[in-house]
Structures are given as structure tokens and as C-alpha cells.
Image: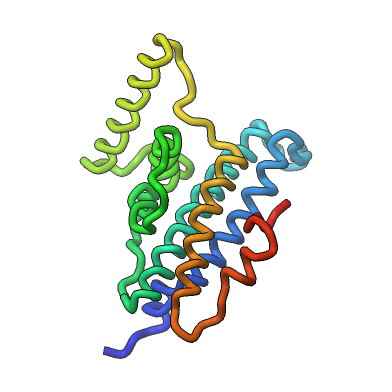
Amino acid sequence: MVETIHDLRRRAPLHFWNRAENARACAYVLWQLIDDPPDVSTLNYDGSASYAMSEAFDRESSFAIESILKAAVAAQREADGNKEPPPSRHDVGELWSLAQLPRPDEDDRTRLMLLTEMLYWSARYAAPLPGKKAEDRMDAIAERAKRRKRKDGGMFVALAPWTWDHFERMYQVAHQACFEALDRRPGRRKWAEDTLGEGDGNLIE
């Protein structure tokens, strides 16, 4: 069967990487605007511009994490001669494992769970689609919250903060894995040398 351009794009590492980098740049700008929001008085907007920037940061940063993880998975599969594209699901915990990244600590596992919820619904919709998978994900987060409350003496605390620094640290782990895998492709350009060799891989200072 002849492959279509869509078939090729579904497994193209640099397609996912490009989307990830664009979303990362947006997330960076939005993070800066949370404390210094733009004037939206001409929009007849009654909400908080700062809160709107925070919501937008969650959307862009979660999409960037999903995309860079799919880039890493796609690059690894291409390097291994596997033509299967990354899964179309939004479960970033699953993608982190598929990308064979270092096992995350407790807080980062919580972040991956919360990011998955952002991608499926909480950063976009009023409620998740009904179904057992959504209920299981929310039950797992609720159980994690109960454990955190017990650990902290019953006081209410955030499950895990999500800031630019948390995002960028996790993003760069997947970014490096992506380009190390691209370098394993026979006869191809050495991407990691060009992209990561100039510093720590952080393209936004």
C-alpha cells in the first residue's frame, strides 16, 4: 500500500519536534505575562487577564510536553527501523515510559498525571468524556492527593507545582532523548551535536 503524506507525518520526529518547540516558545511568553498581563480593557473582558495567561500556559506547556515526547518516541522508532508512529493518545506518563526516559520521582509522576488530565480535558473542557478510563485517571489523582494529605499532616497542599522551571526541566530530558535517537539513524545528520553541543540544550535563556 502506498503511504500518504499523512502517514509519513504521523511518524516524522521533526514534525513533532517543530510543534513542540513552537508550543514551548508560546509557553515561555505566556509564563512571563502571568505577572505582567497585557491590557485587555478594550475587549470588554470581565475576567482576570493574569488567570487567562496561566490557563493558556497550562495548555501550551502540556501540548509541548506531549509533542516532544512523541518526537522522542518517533525518533527512537525510526532509528530502530520501526515504522510504527507514536500512539495518538495524550497520556504523557505512557509516552514518558515509551521514550525510555529516566524513571520520574514522585512529584514528576504526579505532574505527568496532571498534564495528562490537562491534555484530555481540564485545560480545554468543562468535564471529561464519560467513561471508565477518565474515571480511573481521576481516581488515581484523588488517591495521590489523599496520600499527600496524610504525609503532610492532613493539611491541604498542591499536588505538585507546575511552573516554567518544572516544564523546562522535563522538556529538556525528552528533547535530549529525541536528538540522541536522531543521531543513531545511519547516514543522517548529527543533530545532537548541532542542537545540544552549544550549551545545555536550553534554547530560551
The picture quadrant where one finds residue 144 is top left
Residue 205 in picture, x, y percent from top left: 73, 51
- Along the viewing direction, whichever of 73 and 54 lies nearer the viewer: 73
Q: Residue at x 49, y 52 (%)?
A: 65
Residue 130 in picture, x, y percent from top left: 26, 41
**One can see residue 127 in this view:** yes
In the image, 171: left or right of 126?
right
In the image, 148: left or right of 171?
left
Residue 142 in picture, x, y percent from top left: 33, 26
By what rule are the colours in the image chosen? rainbow
Q: Residue at x 48, y 64 (%)?
A: 178
- Along the viewing direction, whichever of 147 and 135 lies nearer the viewer: 147
Against 76, residue 148 (above or below) is: above
Against 101, residue 140 (above or below) is: above
Q: Residue at x 64, y 31 (%)?
A: 47
- Give the residue furthest to the bottom: 2
- Give the residue furthest to the left: 132
The picture quadrant where one finds residue 112 is top left
Against 60, residue 137 (above or below) is: above
The quarter of the image holding the N terminus is: bottom left
- Along the viewing direction, whichever of 89 and 108 lies nearer the viewer: 108
**One can see residue 126 in this view:** no
Q: How many marks?
A: 0
Q: Residue at x 44, y 63 (%)?
A: 72
Against 6, residue 202 (above or below) is: above
Residue 97 in picture, x, y percent from top left: 34, 52
